[in-house]
Image (tube, rainbow, N blue to C red):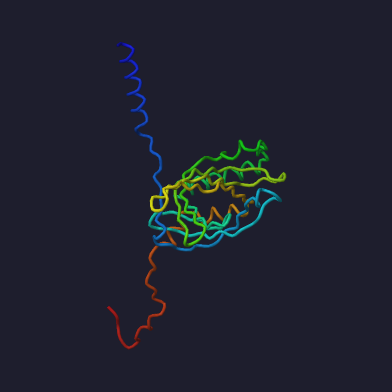
Amino acid sequence: MRYIYILSAILILSSCGSIGIKKEVFSVDLNSRQIPIGTVEIQLNKFLSIGGLKKIDAEVIYFPNENAVCLKYRHEFNTVHFFWSYVGRQALIDGLKRYNESYDARSLSTRGKKTIKEYGTVLGYIYWQMASFTILSRGNADVNIGYQFKNRSPYFTILQGKAEYRSRDVDESTRTSASVTMYFTRAQAKELAALFDQELLTSIAAPPTTRIDNLPPPDANRDYY
């Protein structure tokens, strides 16, 4: 019995220690207010990873109600909405700063997959759909921020992990999104990080101020008090 009490005490202490740990709850309503803020160029592996990288343009859209930024792009016949929370955006900005420091110091590692999570893992939210008449799938996915070498050139990378969605309306089947690695030169990553800046996003979402430059000139024949 003594050992049972000891084991119970250990389990209670362990559970108490984990109470303060909170995983980020993150989702986005695709029908929320949207503000287009630009486009960024990203590079993806070509089909079956044969022949290097291909460049595509991704729309960047701000969802102020959720304070989320979306990268909207096409991949393998799907339209993908890839959402970043404030926490995720800050992790990318901080990671890019560390990457640039290591790049300038020529201290980047060439050990392949070990560098994929170099700057941390955050939670993303993804919608994916092949066509307007097909099921719109959605779910959370881990996002790894790091870097990789490709053909002897280093790239700042984002690994968009797989998301799973269980359809309740049609066939109760589970749909899984593709895992996508995005490659950025330093210039491309800088442009993305600039659009992730919270001060910029706050200013874009702020209501317009009343303009006074079109008011008629004051009447010189009267005083205003």
Residue drawn at the location 49% of the way across and 56% of the way down: 129
Pick whichever, 125 or 204, lies toward us: 125
Quadrant position of the N terminus in the picture? top left
Residue 109 sits above or below residue 66 on the image: above
Residue drawn at the location 59% of the way across and 60% of the way down: 57
Residue drawn at the location 61% of the way across and 43% of the way down: 147
Residue drawn at the location 70% of the way across and 46% of the way down: 153
Residue 96 on image: x %, y %: 57, 46
Residue 121 sits above or below residue 80 on the image: above
- Residue closest to the far top: 2
In this picture, residue 10 sits left or right of residue 190: left
Pick whichever, 88 or 9, lies toward us: 9
In this picture, residue 156 sits left or right of residue 196: right
Residue 36 on image: x %, y %: 48, 63
- Residue closest to the far front: 171
Quadrant position of the C terminus in the picture? bottom left
Q: Quadrant of residue 113?
A: top right
Residue 97 on image: x %, y %: 57, 45
Residue 42 on image: x %, y %: 60, 55
In this picture, residue 28 sits left or right of residue 46: left
- Residue closest to the far left: 225
Pick whichever, 165 or 90, lies toward us: 165
